[in-house]
Amino acid sequence: MDAPREKPKMTRRRFLKLLGIGGAATAVVGTGYSAVEACWINDTFETVTIPRLPSAFKGLRVAFLTDIHHGPFTWLSYVKAIVARTNALKPDVIVLGGDYIHTDAKYIAPVFETLGSLSAPLGVYGVLGNHDHYHGAAECSAAMSAAGLVELTNSGVWLKKAGQRFRIAGLGDYWEDIQDLDAALDDCRSEETCLLLSHNPDPIEDITDGRVGLMLSGHTHGGQVVLPLVGPPYIPSQYGRKYMRGFVATPTSQVFVSRGLGTITPPLRFSCRPEINLLTLI
């Protein structure tokens, strides 16, 4: 009978070697999971109270899509899945928060052709984001129009129902354009209210106009990679994590920041699933 073999001693060198192997394995598993999470869409349902919302629009269902970033990391098949999933929710109106592309202007035409299949009884509206400006704002505007989507950069539209009206408007991108709130609100009276689109949430800090009942934004991706105990390594906002995701109230208005749907480099998400937001206004 063979004598039992001795267990190897846990030397410092061996401990560090095992630690390195374990760390590498964890990184591989973590990266694999993060790649899966990057396209693991979550439907998020919210009920939002908007001051002075006309009674005819109580219960209005608004689908909000932002930061799709069609490009080398966000395939067109994924965008098609977003469209099908959104249409299946049967929203009354669909609004788009910008950043439709990533890295190259060649992605402009395909993404808007696909988004042109979005359907809602009261229409589909959107604004541009900073990445759209990086690769061709004019081209994005033209492609958006050709697809039947209504761009609301520093402008707005009135939804009308039962003799009442509710405004949806948008601002130019905070980093790459101008923001003309007066033009966006236009003839909106003080007793009326507006749903305002702004790709970047930071402008809400300067909005003191009570006609803005709710602003919808993206841009921050919810942090995209949210590490345990640490949080996101970077948030593209001058206010840090304040507008990372979710609802944030200001003295005058409120903003809802979506985690968005696509990614930029790195093409990963961790503890921050992409989301389609369906908001019911009351």
Image: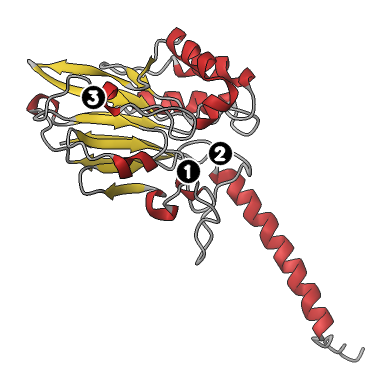
For numbered disc 3, what is the local secondary structure? helix
Mark 2–mark 3 CB contact (< 8 Å): no
Q: What amino acid is found at the position of numbered circle 1 in the picture? A: His
For numbered disc 1, what is the local secondary structure? helix
Mark in the foreground, 1 or 3: 3
Give the spatial CA distance, label 1 vs label 2: 8 Å
For numbered disc 2, what is the local secondary structure? loop
From where the camera sits, is residue 68 visible? no
Number of residues whose C-alpha sits closer than 10 Å to that of mark 3, classed few (under 14), some (14–19) or many (20 or more):
many
Number of residues whose C-alpha sits closer than 10 Å to that of mark 1, classed few (under 14), some (14–19) or many (20 or more):
many
Mark sitting on residue 185? 3
Residue 76: give x, y in percent of width and height: 57, 24
Number of residues whose C-alpha sits closer than 10 Å to that of mark 2, classed few (under 14), some (14–19) or many (20 or more):
many
Mark 1–mark 3 CB contact (< 8 Å): no
Q: What amino acid is found at the position of numbered circle 2 in the picture? A: Thr
Residue drawn at (17%, 41%) of the image: 49
| Residue to which mark 2 is pinned | 263
**9 shown above or below 14:** below
- Please state which of residues 97 and 276 is positioned toward the viewer in this rendering: 97
- As drawn, is 153 to the left or to the right of 175? left
Residue 71: give x, y in percent of width and height: 61, 28
Give the spatial CA distance, label 2 vs label 3: 31 Å
Sequence-wise first label, 2 or 3: 3
Residue 64: give x, y in percent of width and height: 35, 31
Sequence-wise first label, 1 or 3: 3
Mark in the foreground, 2 or 3: 3
Q: What amino acid is found at the position of numbered circle 3 in the picture? A: Leu
From where the camera sits, is residue 97 visible? yes
Mark sitting on residue 221? 1
Mark 1–mark 2 CB contact (< 8 Å): yes
Residue 252 lies in quadrant: top left
- Please state which of residues 22 and 175 is positioned toward the viewer in this rendering: 175
